């Protein structure tokens, strides 16, 4: 199409694109945070990752909602030489579950609970479970996103009753700062994406096994990006 529009040969177009490293057939999406306190929140959260407070636990909290128990209409076939594994395009739905998870940044372990819904009631139940799990002598710094449930009046009331807890909110449209998102990505790619689940109970059991396997060989979360570079890229993107 380019060659026809410009009036040159196809190979000439290819050479020009290669010389300038242009890929017009690709588009990369991006999302910039419009949070006026983006820089302060970024530095605060990265500070928790790289220099956590003494006598405290740093937890990355979030929920993965509406995880579907999908059953394939026909059994798939395993991969073999020269052929990829197969899976039917259509599926049967058997219900959903929501996984609440807390990643301990210091040792990489996961506290997880499956619940039917993801309202403030379920979130408070999860907070109680985490509170019981963490030794009472430790303060808790929890990194959470801006989902309305996390800022519900009942949740704020719970926080006033549990003074050892401190919430640190990620900037708007910057959930990538929340370390537990990496765990959710692994759960999706390694267990859910190709899974076959005949019931919600089957799905929950698979999720719980994955959490147990993660905790049997945990890896501490290590932040490597320079906050100054992140801010520079964000500022450059906002000026486009």
Image: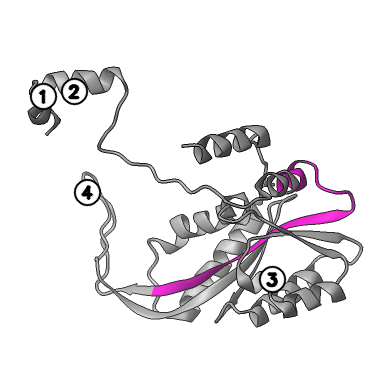
Residue linked to disc 2: 14
Of the pair 235 and 88, the residue shown nearer to us = 235
Q: Is residue 87 left or right of residue 125?
A: left
Q: Residue at x 27, y 69 (%)?
A: 75
Helix, strand or loop status at disc 1: helix
> Earlier along the polypeptide chain: callout 1 or callout 3?
1
Is the C-beta separation of discs 1 and 2 under 8 Å? Answer: yes
Q: Position of residue 190 (x, y in %)?
A: 46, 56
Residue linked to disc 4: 83
Q: CA distance from mark 1 to mark 3?
A: 57 Å
Q: Is residue 108 left or right of residue 58?
A: left
Is the C-beta separation of discs 4 and 2 under 8 Å? Answer: no
Q: Position of residue 177 (x, y in %)?
A: 62, 50
Residue linked to disc 3: 151
> Earlier along the polypeptide chain: callout 4 or callout 2?
2
On screen, residue 8 above or below 229 = above
Is the C-beta separation of discs 4 and 1 under 8 Å? Answer: no
In which quadrant of the rendered view does residue 169 lie? bottom right
Q: Residue at x 79, y 77 (%)?
A: 158
Q: CA distance from mark 1 to mark 2?
A: 6 Å
Residue linked to disc 1: 10
Q: Is residue 91 left or right of residue 116?
A: left
Q: CA distance from mark 4 to mark 1?
A: 34 Å
The magenta span reads: 45-69
Where does the N terminus fall, quadrant-wise?
top left
Q: CA distance from mark 3 to mark 4?
A: 50 Å
> Earlier along the polypeptide chain: callout 2 or callout 3?
2
């Amino acid at each position: 199409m380019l060659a026809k529009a410009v009036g040159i040969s196809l190979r000439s177009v290819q050479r020009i694109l290669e010389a300038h490293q242009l890929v017009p057939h690709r588009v990369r999406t991006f999302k910039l945070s419009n949070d006026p306190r983006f820089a302060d929140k970024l530095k605060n959260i990265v500070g928790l990752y790289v220099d956590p407070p003494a006598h405290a636990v740093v937890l990355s909290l979030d929920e993965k909602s509406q995880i579907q128990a999908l059953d394939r209409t026909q059994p798939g076939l395993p991969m073999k030489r020269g052929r990829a594994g197969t899976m039917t395009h259509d599926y049967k739905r058997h219900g959903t579950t929501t996984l609440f998870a807390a990643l301990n940044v210091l040792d990489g372990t996961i506290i997880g609970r499956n619940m039917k819904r993801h309202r403030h009631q379920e979130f408070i139940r999860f907070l109680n479970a985490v509170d019981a799990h963490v030794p009472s002598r430790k303060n808790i710094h929890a990194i959470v996103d801006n989902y309305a449930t996390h800022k519900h009046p009942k949740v704020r009331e719970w926080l006033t009753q549990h003074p050892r807890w401190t919430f640190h909110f990620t900037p708007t449209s910057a959930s990538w700062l929340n370390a537990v998102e990496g765990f959710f990505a692994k759960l999706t790619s390694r267990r859910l994406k190709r899974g076959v689940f005949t019931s919600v109970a089957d799905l929950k059991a698979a999720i719980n096994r994955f959490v147990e396997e993660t905790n049997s060989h945990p890896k501490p979360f290590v932040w490597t990006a320079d906050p100054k570079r992140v801010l520079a890229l964000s500022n450059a993107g906002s000026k486009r």
